[in-house]
Amino acid sequence: AEETQSLLESYKGQLNHAARLMLDTDLPVDKKVAIFENIFSDFPEMISISLYKNDIAQPITIYDNISLTQAGLNQESIDRFQKRHPLPLNKIKNGKTYIGNSTISEALLTITIAFRIAHHNSAIISAQVKLDQLTKLVSRSKLFESFILDANHAMIAHTDRNYIAQHKVPD
């Protein structure tokens, strides 16, 4: 449990870094573009990063097109999923961190992490994150069936990829 919490906190730290870059109005556009071209190599677990500003429901999103293409997906796949499964923006604005299963394809298991950005009360950052590291954590036990659930009791990590891909809820 501690390792899972530590891993999720590291994702939040990476997202805070991305949020600062996205919100930096002093950084010239050409430098921002150069930084964001490399952001997914700096944060290889991230598939997409979205910024919601000033109560706007449509986020500004950047994508790891290489990972999406390798999984047979594209930006529209992410956008469709986000529209069908909107984030609970009001809860997040009130300080609640959201973590949920956002797997679109068994080829690319992901969770979404979203939270309000410190010192920017009207801004929310979210990301779709590959589940590789969480899956490794739950796969360590050879004695017990291990898994991690989101707040809605859907699987976000399990040794059986089908549980995650099908958004299964345990019995």
Image: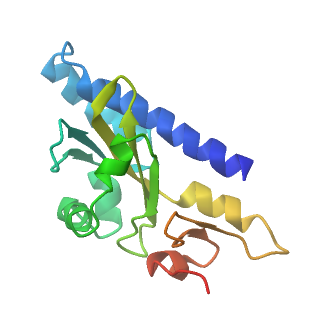
Residue at 56%, 38% in the rendered image? 10
Left or right of 162 on screen, residue 137: right
Closest to the observer, 91 or 161? 91
Left or right of 70 on screen, residue 98: right
Count of numbered badges drawn on the protein: 0
Residue at 19%, 46% in the rendered image? 59
* Residue 48 in sight here: no
Closest to the observer, 166 or 46? 166
Quadrant assignment, res 132: bottom right
Left or right of 28 on screen, residue 10: right
Position of residue 169 measured from the top left corner of the image (x, y, whole percent): 53, 80
Q: Is residue 149 above or below residue 122?
A: below
Tell me which colouring the rendered structure shows: rainbow
Q: Quadrant of the C terminus?
A: bottom right
Position of residue 159 measured from the top left corner of the image (x, y, whole percent): 64, 74
Q: Residue furthest right?
A: 143
Position of residue 70 measured from the top left corner of the image (x, y, whole percent): 34, 64
Position of residue 103 measured from the top left corner of the image (x, y, whole percent): 40, 69
Quadrant assignment, res 40: top left
Residue at 40%, 39% in the rendered image? 41
* Residue 83 in sight here: yes
Q: Is residue 153 above or below residue 4?
A: below
Quadrant assignment, res 80: bottom left
Q: Residue furthest bottom?
A: 171
